[in-house]
Every structure is written in C-alpha cells, then in structure tokens.
Image (tube, rainbow, N blue to C red):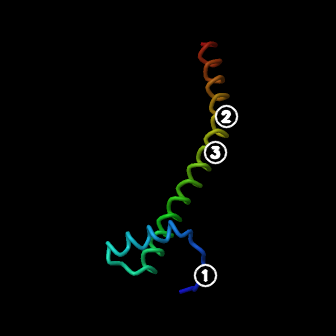
Amino acid sequence: MKNISLKIDDLVFREVEKIREGMKQPRNRYINEAIAFYNKFQRKQLLEKRLKMESELVKADSMEVLKDFDTIDDAD
C-alpha cells in the first residue's frame, strides 16, 4: 500500500466525515473506495470517447460501402 499526502477542501472533508461516520467506515477505506469508483467512472468515459471516435471513422467507410451497393443494385 502507498502513502500519499493530499489537501482536501474543508467543505468536501466535512462532507466525507459526516457520511463515513454514518456508515461507520474508516476514513482510509472510504477514500479508497471513492477513488476506485472514480477510476471506474473515468475508464468508462475514456472508453465511450474512444468508441465514438472509432465509430466516426467507420461511419465514413460504411457510407462508401452503402453507395457501392446502391450502384450495384441500380445496375441490375
């Protein structure tokens, strides 16, 4: 396990303390779970962005293929 030092806004810290005390959860565990949740959220955001970009790349090729099929259908 790694040790880190971080500064948290007073308002955020008070909110963390209020919530985790109600959950009867140690501060370290609460913060670790919060960071893990945020990492998962960010991974999903990055994946979504990547999929949108790749979809746009494929879209142009797909439109060309559709045009080719229309040309073939018109020739019949």
Q: Residues within 10 Å of mark 2 (few under 14, many from 20)?
A: few
Q: Residues within 10 Å of mark 1 (few under 14, many from 20)?
A: few
Q: Which x, y percent locates residue 32? A: 48, 75
Say what amino acid the circle numbered 1 marks.
Answer: Ser
**Front position in the image: 61 or 34:** 34
Please tell me in which quadrant of the rendered image residue 23 appears.
bottom left
- The secondary structure type at the circle numbered 2 is helix
Give me the residue at 38% from left, 71% from top: 18
Distance of label 1 from label 3 (alpha carbons) = 39 Å
Tag in front: 1 or 3: 1
Give me the residue at 66% from left, 24% from top: 68
Name the residue tied to disc 3: 54
Name the residue tied to disc 1: 5
Disc 3 or 2, which lies upstream in sequence? 3
Q: Are marks 3 and 2 in contact (CB under 8 Å)?
A: no
**Front position in the image: 56 or 32:** 32
Name the residue tied to disc 2: 61
- The secondary structure type at the circle numbered 3 is helix
Q: Which x, y percent locates residue 45? A: 56, 53
- The secondary structure type at the circle numbered 1 is loop
Please tell me in which quadrant of the rendered image residue 69 appears.
top right
Say what amino acid the circle numbered 2 marks.
Answer: Asp
**Front position in the image: 8 or 70:** 8
Disc 1 or 3, which lies upstream in sequence? 1
Tag in front: 3 or 2: 3
Say what amino acid the circle numbered 3 marks.
Answer: Glu
Disc 2 or 1, which lies upstream in sequence? 1
Q: Which x, y percent locates residue 57? A: 67, 40
Q: Is residue 26 left or right of residue 36?
A: left
Please tell me in which quadrant of the rendered image residue 59 appears.
top right
